[in-house]
Amino acid sequence: MSKNLDTINHHESVVRSYIRNFPTVFTKAKQHKMWDEDGKEYLDFFSGAGALNYGHNDDHMKEKLIEYISSDGITHSLDMASTAKAEFLEKFDDVILKPRDLDYKVMFPGPTGTNTVESALKLARKVTGRTDIISFTGGFHGMTIGSLSVTGNSMKRQGAGIPLQNTVTMAYDNYVDHDTIVYLERFLEDSGSGVAIPAAMIVETVQGEGGINAARFEWLKQIEEICRRWGILLIIDDVQAGIGRTGSFFSFEAAGIKPDIICLSKSLSGYGLPLAVTLIKPELDIWKPGEHNGTFRGNNHAFVTATAALDYWKDESFEKEIHEKSELIYNFLEKIVTDYPEIKGEVRGRGFMIGIASEVEGLAEKITARCFKLGLIMETAGPNDEVFKLFPPLNIPKDELQKGLDIIEESVKDLVK
Ligand code: PMP
């Protein structure tokens, strides 16, 4: 056992979880590779659960950050104006919002994913004057009380130790063969039903933690229509599915919907630094100064790397590249499912947010454990960890991607043959 691992196990609270699946101490990482203290090299098909979509220590972002730090660029400024913030906002508008014909105000809710979700839920309630939020089975939105209250995972919810209130959980698309959203509308139409009009619905277009469940575009459109009819605000949580994971910058683009509020974090800084934004339609910008603040809203180092990361999106070549590689992954996974019927697998997901759900109890965890031994880092997802989830960085070279896929096949072969 490593001394460093001992130290961490001894001092850190037992709540840590990833250390169980990846029991080593990492020292260094570059692009799609990580190294541990024994010098063992790993391919990273985990990407910090979607926080490293451009890989580790991207050269362009690193250069900009070093330049900024060397010139004593401002580090912490609360929400005072800084050049780093202005440059980020301008480029985000030029490269991301304007070309997609999207008109949103940018709010900095706090450093992480759960902060953007909290701000979205709070703002939706303030704007509508209503209480309830509709969320979906299998949804994951964060660990603070508000975001946990809309998270559809009973184990996580039990972490609060009390009932979490003012949310209504409906079945996510493809969980059932009938559409519960239609029932919701019947309840709303019936004044005697006692069901109050909710403030908002919060949806992931592809559920990450919930098991790589991809909603159909028609279902997303249907949800948007219901929201419009009833004046319910549509919140898309793109914390995990956003920033290119599904093939386009925002995950909802392909479905052709326009949310009222968008939650972004994870890969927004591009460099693994904490940064979150809540994008809100301009008419929702009603909070008075100070009604939502916090010490670490907008980290200037993260602004610098986030601005550099936007260079990936300046033309369409990056999206094309993601698309080509995701086809390679999809075809490979389909072949695994066909060639190894013993795993009773089903390919799920979109783009680079993809995995195989196995009906064989415990198999996905065994596969990821075997992959780890063979030098590939991958995690499981879903309520019973039944999905092994592929999350390589979006810019991984094709031959390195193939190496990782070969390790997956080898692991599957080892386990079923
Ligand atoms: N929303 C989604 C969809 C997520 O996947 C996560 C994190 N896995 C969060 C919110 C919460 O983000 P954070 O862990 O940064 O608070």
Image: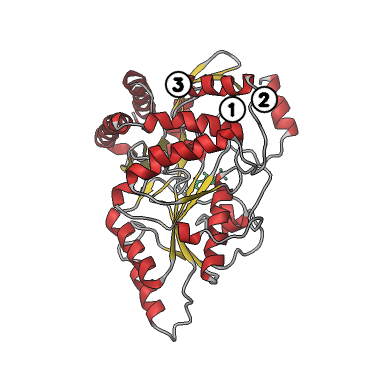
Q: Which of marks 1 and 3 is nearer the N terminus?
A: 1
Residue 271 seen from this side: no
Residue 138 vertical placement versus 348 (above, below): below
Give residue 280's position: percent from left, percent from top.
48, 54
> Residue type at mark 3?
Leu
Residue 328 vertical placement versus 215 (above, below): above
Residue 226 vertical placement versus 106 (above, below): below
Tell me the tag on residue 5.
2
On the image, numbered disc 3 is attached to which residue?
374
Q: Which of marks 1 and 2 is nearer the N terminus?
A: 2
On the image, numbered disc 1 is attached to which residue?
23
The Cα atoms of the two marked residues, 1 and 3, are separated by: 14 Å
| Relative horizontal placement of residue 366, taking residue 224 as reference (left or right) | right
The Cα atoms of the two marked residues, 3 and 2, are separated by: 20 Å
| Relative horizontal placement of residue 362, taking residue 321 as reference (left or right) | right
Residue 198 vertical placement versus 277 (above, below): below
> Residue type at mark 1?
Pro
Q: Is mark 2 within 8 Å of ligand 1?
A: no
Q: What element carries label 2?
A: helix
Give residue 73's position: percent from left, percent from top.
63, 27
Q: Do the residues labelled 1 and 2 touch (CB within 8 Å)?
A: yes
**Is disc 3 surrounded by few (<14), some (14 to 19) or many (20+) residues within 10 Å?**
some
Q: State the quadrant of the C terminus.
A: top left
| Relative horizontal placement of residue 200, taking residue 112 as reference (left or right) | left
